[in-house]
Amino acid sequence: MFGLFTPEAHKQRLPDGSIDPVYKRLRWQLFVGIFFGYAGYYLVRKNFSLAMPYLIEEYGYSRGELGVALAAVSIAYGLSKFLMGNVSDRSNPRFFLASGLILSSIVMLCFGFMPWATGSITAMFVLLFLNGWFQGMGWPACGRTMVHWWSHKERGGLVSVWNVAHNVGGGLIGPLFLFGLWAFNDDWRSAFYVPAFFALLVAGFTILVMRDTPQSCGLPPIEEYKDDYPESYDKSFEEEMTAKEIFFKYIFNNKLLWFIAIANAFVYLIRYGVLDWAPVYLGEAKGFTVDKSSWAYFLYEWAGIPGTLLCGWISDKLFKGRRAPAGILFMVLVTVAVLVYWLNPPGNPTIDMMALISIGFLIYGPVMLIGLYALELAPKKAAGTAAGLTGLFGYLGGAVAANALLGYTVDNFGWDGGFMVLTGSCVLAIFFFIITMIGEKKAYQKQQLELQQQNG
Ligand SMILES: O=P(O)(O)OC[C@H](O)CO
């Protein structure tokens, strides 16, 4: 199986006249592959929550027990995005992306068709852990494709458009579940097998459309094609690296990467803290009914789409490709929206909804920027591992804390305590973005100085 992942050998360069049309066609084809591929991953990542009410009713599991099982996804995903990210940096994304999706779908088919799979918390924990692990194969494979096929200057716009794939996939699981209930006589297990079926179709599609590097298709590297070279670029950027080289040369000693990874932990605490607790908070503290809070949940996800696109555009155009200032701007606005969501007295549901939608609109921009920035902070053969490090912090630090720490805080200190944690996270995320911005400026000045010295 691992032979399947081996990066494809470079092919003889195509004649000059074919390079432009082939590059253009393949870039469209690959974008469709990674967009639908990653949306497919979310179909089989977030669907377990839909089955939870039925698991509570039929099997008598407590919320706490299911919460522990669910935490397995975040723990495994955080570890895997980093470790499988490193494997992905040395693998052909055509098969790597599809393999993770197929394996994740198989786990969901087990939940759908094997009664033992939902028969105990241990079985669910193990299966969800496996699912989280396979899920970690998606982002890095898409990242590898983006850094090999789009040049540095193009990536702000590209990554922000690609990034909305996860909102599209995450938003589709609700309607798919309704379709499953309608098509399969109200069988709630369709929450597992219907998205798994669609995810398998997507996996087949990605195998058809995905390719490895431009050189494996007889094309020049993207830097040459677009005449857009990163400052430190040299020929060695085109050679595949060993795991040791990636970790020790480009990841562990990369200070800016560590700062954005820590910022990501706080950003993810807000992303999942607000999202996962929205139905409970709105019901308990603001008197929302279930259907209203489900809508709020859906709108939070889809508001992220225009917000992400706007953030990418602002970062590229207003801040000339610098990521940290756009991150700071959006996080300051997130803080304001979190304060409104917290302090708005009960009885003003429109303001609550507006605040929640604003958080959804604003938070996915920084989420995207951190992923994009990670891709930019390492050479392209180490990009997946770099993004993986931010995922490790985001999920092991942020998402797990969003469930466990927030739940514990709300139990012991009420919603005011919970919102103090969320507001503190906003402030800390901004703080780490500021440190990154200072580092970003220093690195830029150093590069300019080196360039001046080289030129004369
Ligand atoms: O939370 P992840 O790892 O699925 O990433 C979501 C977004 O794509 C981040 O850029």
Image (tube, helix red, strand yellow):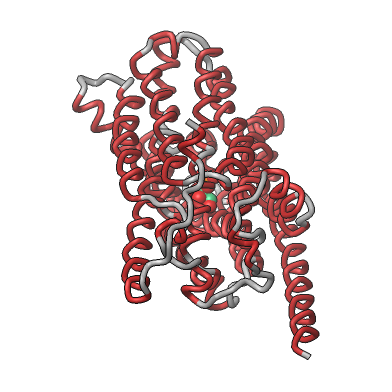
Could you say which quadrant of the image residue 244 lies in? top right
Please give the name of the residue rendered at 50% of the width and 20% of the height, measured from the top-left corner.
127
Judge from the rendering whether residue 412 lies leftward or rightward of residue 380; answer left or right. Answer: right
Does residue 154 lie above or below 292 as drawn? below
Q: How many marks?
A: 0
The image position of residue 198, as x and y in percent, is: 30, 35
Does residue 455 lie above or below 303 as drawn? below
Please give the name of the residue rendered at 46% of the width and 62% of the height, measured from the top-left corner.
149
Judge from the rendering whether residue 247 lies leftward or rightward of residue 114; answer left or right. Answer: right
Q: Evaluate whether residue 15 shows in this view.
A: yes
Q: Evaluate whether residue 428 shows in this view.
A: no
The image position of residue 210, as x and y in percent, is: 38, 50
Does residue 61 lie above or below 136 as drawn? above
The foreground one among 275 and 152 is 152
Which quadrant, please, contains the C terminus? Answer: bottom right
The foreground one among 425 and 3 is 3
The foreground one among 53 and 418 is 53
Please give the name of the residue rendered at 50% of the width and 9% of the height, measured from the top-left corner.
120
Q: Residue furthest bottom?
A: 456
The image position of residue 26, as x and y in percent, is: 35, 61
The image position of residue 420, as x and y in percent, is: 70, 45
Could you say which quadrant of the image residue 415 lies in? top right
The foreground one among 168 and 24 is 24
